[in-house]
Image (cartoon, grey):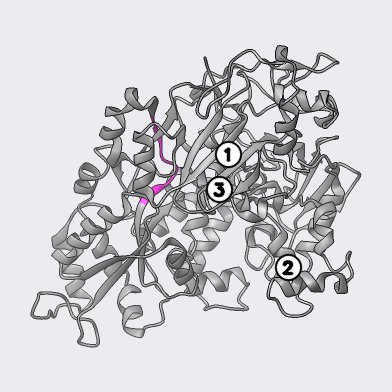
């Protein structure tokens, strides 16, 4: 039964003493007073207490695990140096906006729960989350995790290692459902490493074993690549109804036909019904059992609605079940610019993803009138790095872009100071990972040396085939800085004779073309320079050589074998994840040196500031660190008086 409907019904008869405030409005707090459980140990939101009183929900102590995760000033999802944690109060709706009808990164991050937790997203101080704890053998090969006893899915069903067994045996080891075993689940994160093995110890304990040392694996279970618990814990009781090992295929054929699939194609039906952490803002998450603070209960072309999960497994140090905020409401808008207009109109309570420095003055001018505040925090990515596809299927293109002199020339042809001043208002520095000094004379010399010394009648350099060589950027409006940065870079490159064009395309089309190896050039963000060792996932060739990336991902079964220097670069990244201590630091230094030497990605600027837009009435907003960490701590946000 829909929990939102139950709450609405229960509120019709809720006793007045359960509330300490007036009617709730979006973007405001209703000053709801927590209602204590009969045991006096835990308390809950008045709306949930009303459901308990009406017999529609079990008492809070039965909905929580035996040992909930406790968020306190000493330990929560933000490092102590970046937040003065307060025990909050219940109430309010958090309003958001999203340019895509089915994707809201801000809400995705707020709802993304992992097996382990790393406050501040740097993979330091890893501790329990969905799993209460973990242990590692001295050889760094076996990791034993214990799920919280009594933890429940949002539909009230228990979470046990049966969900882990099902995920491992019936999903990961099923070749129909898992075509390629994930690289990060292989020993030492190697593409040709042996797949992990899972052993079930009891109802709540299981171990994950590798054939080689893998010190960085807990980081994947907490924050790296934003992995969620769904990688290892799927709701078996829900998904078995679409799995041919548990439901007769004949019983699935009607649904298979309704999906337009071939007869017997149950695995595609299963994947269409399975909502992973990346699907939390998409329609398939409706009525799907989750462990997140809020549940998607309604989605239309204009609005997405999330209500609190009554079985959420966290409490604060006062025993109040989280989250504090009752629900999330996200309005679909036409584009990023419209997101900002909604902010200026006072219709947004939290915006990070679409907030950009080029709007900083405008944000500040309207703070008081629109009822929000701007918190200037750190960006967790380098936001605007040009990428050339070194494996695009064109021999002339490949000959030019695979000459490292060409990539170095393009890097030093960029006047980063101009970009820092014009786009980032001084809140950035030039990349330290590639040659980043502005030196057009050096750029011209390198281009001449490699044979691009002849020009057409417009002054653009000719390629090896005698035709004007062109870099055609295809840019999606992921953020408002990306188009103006590309325009400036295009001017800089044309100043040294490289014809450079730009067109904007829809984000989904851009992703499709990139995955199909059909893009020559684009511009996007990268996590590596800011987050480092555990965040090197977008330094891999998906950013600069799609065919090589496929080869790595499939252990050479598909794609194109990369050259030795790319293999060595990837091997150094693997070591930085698999090892620890001095060995990790040495691997990291090798990655840096190889990036500087080969300029696989033309990294642009780093240390960029990020304006986080929050309702001025919100509590537990970080004052330092990465802006995105505020998303990961969404359950501890609350509305003050």
Res. 626 visible in picture:
no
> Percent from the top left, x then y, of residue 257?
74, 75
Residue 435: % across, % down: 28, 55
**Magenta stretch holds residue 460:** no
* Among numbered discs 1 and 3, the one appearing first in the sequence: 1
Residue at 60%, 28% (x, y): give it.
325
Q: Magenta residues: mostly which secondary structure? A: strand
Looking at the rendered structure, the secondary structure element under dot 1 is: helix
Look at mark 2 in the image and give the residue it sits on: 269
Query: Which residue does the numbered mark 1 point to in the structure image?
Result: 110
Residue neighbourhood size for the residue with mark 3, other residues' Cα within 10 Å, grouped as few (<14), some (14–19), many (≥20): many
Cα distance between the residues tagged 2 and 1: 28 Å
**The magenta stretch spans which residues?**
375-383
- Tags 3 and 2 in contact by the CB under 8 Å rule? no
Question: Seen from this angle, which residue lies furthest bottom?
Answer: 465
Q: Label 3, on which residue?
A: 534
Mark 2 residue element: helix
User: In which quadrant of the rendered view does residue 269 lie?
Assistant: bottom right
Circle 3 SS class: helix
Q: Quadrant of residue 423?
A: top left
Which mark lies nearer to you, 3 or 2? 2
Q: Return the residue found at the far right.
A: 202
**Nearer-the-camera pick, 636 or 78:** 636
- Please say whether residue 379 is one of the residues in the magenta stretch: yes
């Amino acid at each position: 039964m829909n929990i939102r409907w139950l709450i609405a019904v229960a509120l019709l008869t809720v006793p007045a003493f359960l509330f300490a405030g007036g009617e709730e409005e979006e973007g405001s707090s209703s000053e709801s007073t927590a209602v204590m459980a009969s045991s006096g140990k835990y308390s809950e939101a008045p709306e949930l207490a009303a459901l308990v009183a009406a017999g529609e929900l079990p008492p809070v102590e039965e909905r929580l695990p035996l040992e909930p995760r406790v968020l306190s000033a000493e330990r929560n999802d933000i490092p102590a140096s970046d937040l003065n944690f307060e025990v909050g109060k219940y109430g309010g709706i958090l309003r958001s906006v999203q340019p895509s009808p089915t994707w809201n990164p801000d809400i995705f991050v707020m709802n993304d729960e992992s097996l382990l937790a790393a406050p501040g997203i740097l993979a330091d101080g890893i501790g329990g989350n969905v799993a209460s704890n973990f242990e590692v053998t001295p050889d760094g090969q076996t990791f034993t995790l214990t799920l919280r006893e009594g933890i429940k899915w949002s539909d009230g069903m228990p979470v046990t290692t049966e969900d882990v067994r099902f995920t491992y045996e019936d999903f990961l080891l099923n070749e129909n459902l898992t075509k390629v075993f994930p690289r990060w689940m292989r020993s030492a994160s190697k593409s040709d490493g042996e797949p992990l093995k899972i052993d079930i110890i009891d109802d709540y304990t299981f171990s994950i074993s590798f054939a080689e040392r893998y010190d960085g694996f807990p980081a994947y279970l907490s924050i790296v690549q934003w992995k969620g618990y769904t990688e290892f814990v799927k709701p078996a009781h829900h998904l078995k109804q679409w799995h041919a090992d548990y439901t007769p295929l004949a019983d699935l054929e009607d649904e298979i036909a309704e999906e337009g699939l071939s007869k017997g194609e149950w695995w595609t039906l299963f994947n269409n019904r399975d909502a992973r952490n990346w699907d939390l803002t998409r329609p398939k998450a409706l009525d799907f059992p989750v462990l997140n603070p809020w549940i998607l209960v309604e989605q239309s072309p204009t609005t997405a609605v999330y209500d609190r999960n009554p079985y959420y497994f966290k409490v604060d140090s006062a025993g109040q079940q989280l989250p504090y905020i009752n629900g999330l409401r996200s309005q679909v808008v036409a584009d990023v610019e419209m997101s900002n207009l909604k902010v200026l109109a006072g219709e947004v309570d939290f915006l990070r993803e679409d907030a950009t420095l080029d709007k900083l003055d405008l944000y500040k001018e309207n703070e008081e009138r629109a009822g929000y505040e701007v918190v200037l925090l750190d960006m967790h990515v380098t936001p605007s790095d040009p990428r050339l596809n070194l494996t695009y299927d064109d021999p002339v293109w490949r000959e030019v872009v695979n000459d490292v002199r060409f990539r170095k020339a393009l890097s030093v042809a960029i006047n980063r100071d101009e970009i820092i001043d014009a786009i980032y208002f001084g809140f950035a520095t030039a990349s330290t990972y590639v040659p980043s000094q502005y030196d057009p004379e050096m750029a011209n010399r390198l281009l001449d040396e490699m044979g691009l010394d002849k020009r057409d009648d417009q002054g653009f350099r000719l390629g090896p085939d005698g035709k004007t060589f062109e870099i055609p950027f295809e840019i999606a409006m992921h953020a408002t800085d990306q188009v103006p940065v590309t325009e400036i870079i295009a001017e800089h490159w044309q100043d040294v004779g490289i014809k450079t064009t730009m067109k904007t395309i829809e984000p989904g089309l851009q992703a499709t073309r990139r995955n199909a190896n059909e893009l020559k050039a684009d511009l996007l963000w990268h996590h590596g320079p800011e987050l480092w060792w555990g965040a090197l996932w977008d330094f891999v060739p998906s950013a600069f050589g799609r065919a090589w990336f496929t080869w790595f991902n499939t252990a050479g079964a598909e794609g194109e074998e990369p050259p030795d220097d790319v293999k060595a670069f990837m091997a150094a990244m693997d070591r930085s994840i698999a090892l620890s201590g001095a060995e990790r630091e040495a691997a990291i230094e090798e990655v840096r040196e190889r990036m500087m030497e080969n300029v696989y990605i033309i990294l642009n600027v780093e240390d960029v500031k990020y304006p986080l837009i929050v309702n001025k009435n919100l509590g537990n907003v970080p004052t330092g660190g990465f802006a995105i960490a505020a998303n990961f701590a969404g359950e501890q946000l609350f509305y003050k008086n």
